[in-house]
Amino acid sequence: LTHIEHTLALMNYAGKQSEFKALTTLAVETAFAIGNYEKGLFFQQKLLNTLTPDTPTNERAEVLYRLGILYSRMERFEEAVQQLEEATRLWNESGELDRLAESVATLGVVRENMGAYTEALDKFHESFALYEEIGEMGQTAFQYRRMGRIHYLRLGRYEKAREQFLAALDRYRQERDRQGEAEVLYEVGLTYEKVALFDQASEYYTQGLTIGQELDQPFLIATGHLYLANLAWFQGDYQTAFQRLTQAAQQAELTNDAQLRIMIKNTRGLMY
């Protein structure tokens, strides 16, 4: 990022602006990748300032969309919504359905982060319809999961969440997406665990774990063992719980997911 900034300064000094947009876009992407959202916003606003009445609609929408994403990451949600809604309007006008669907879904995420759960669900429903129209089955499954997570995490509507997760599961199976299938099997299991239906939860966790083992995917394997450890713990079977946690920890070490390792250590501490 420092090299890009120096290059942009030299280009400005030398009066050579032919690569300005490309390098400034790279600066935004680099700042975003390292989590420096303020710096990313600074450069994105420079791109916004280059727009003219003759700028193509899709290019204008893309600049506004990225601006909205940056505002969202900085938790400046009202400004994020303003930019994203304008980008959505432009993509709707131009008929870019794939970008329109993504922008609507992003608005749903921002609304969720604002605590506006009804509006978020409306946006996810809208993006679902758009993805279905363009035949993106994997994305329709993901929108089902987003709606399910709001019901599960935000509203405590576990049965409604389960309906959404099971709908996603059906889509993943149609697409033969084994990774997605395993992830959503765990989510279905969580909805049963929350209402103390441990046998049903165990059934779904075990199915997800089996797929993780077939795929030789450490994150999925670790997650399955962690969830099954929790079930054993809740039912007073501490020996099985610790055994499962040990297996989860071994698999978690093979991933780059620090959060998963933290969850496993925290669960072990709580059990002790």
Image (cartoon, rainbow, N blue to C red):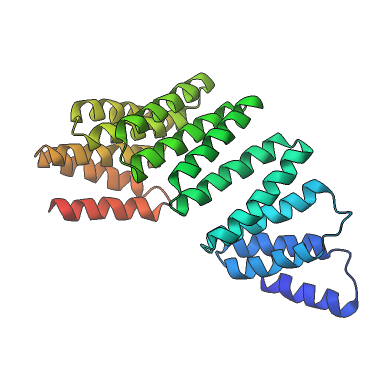
Q: Quadrant of residue 131?
A: top right
Q: Residue at x 57, y 26 (%)?
A: 137
Q: Residue at x 19, y 52 (%)?
A: 268
262 or 73: nearer the viewer: 73
- Residue 239 position in % (x across, y down): 11, 41
> Left or right of 265: which side holds 242?
left
Q: Residue at x 59, y 54 (%)?
A: 81
Q: Quadrant of residue 66?
A: bottom right
Q: Residue furthest toward the bottom?
A: 13
- Residue 96 position in % (x across, y down): 74, 37
90 or 235: nearer the viewer: 90
> Left or right of 183: which side holds 14?
right
> Left or right of 75: which side holds 5?
right
Q: Quadrant of residue 43?
A: bottom right
> Up-down: is 65 above or below 27?
above
> Left or right of 15: which side holds 227?
left
How many labels, in total? Answer: 0
For the N terminus, the quadrant is bottom right
For the C terminus, the quadrant is bottom left
97 or 177: nearer the viewer: 97
- Residue 266 position in % (x across, y down): 24, 55
> Up-down: is 219 above or below 216?
below
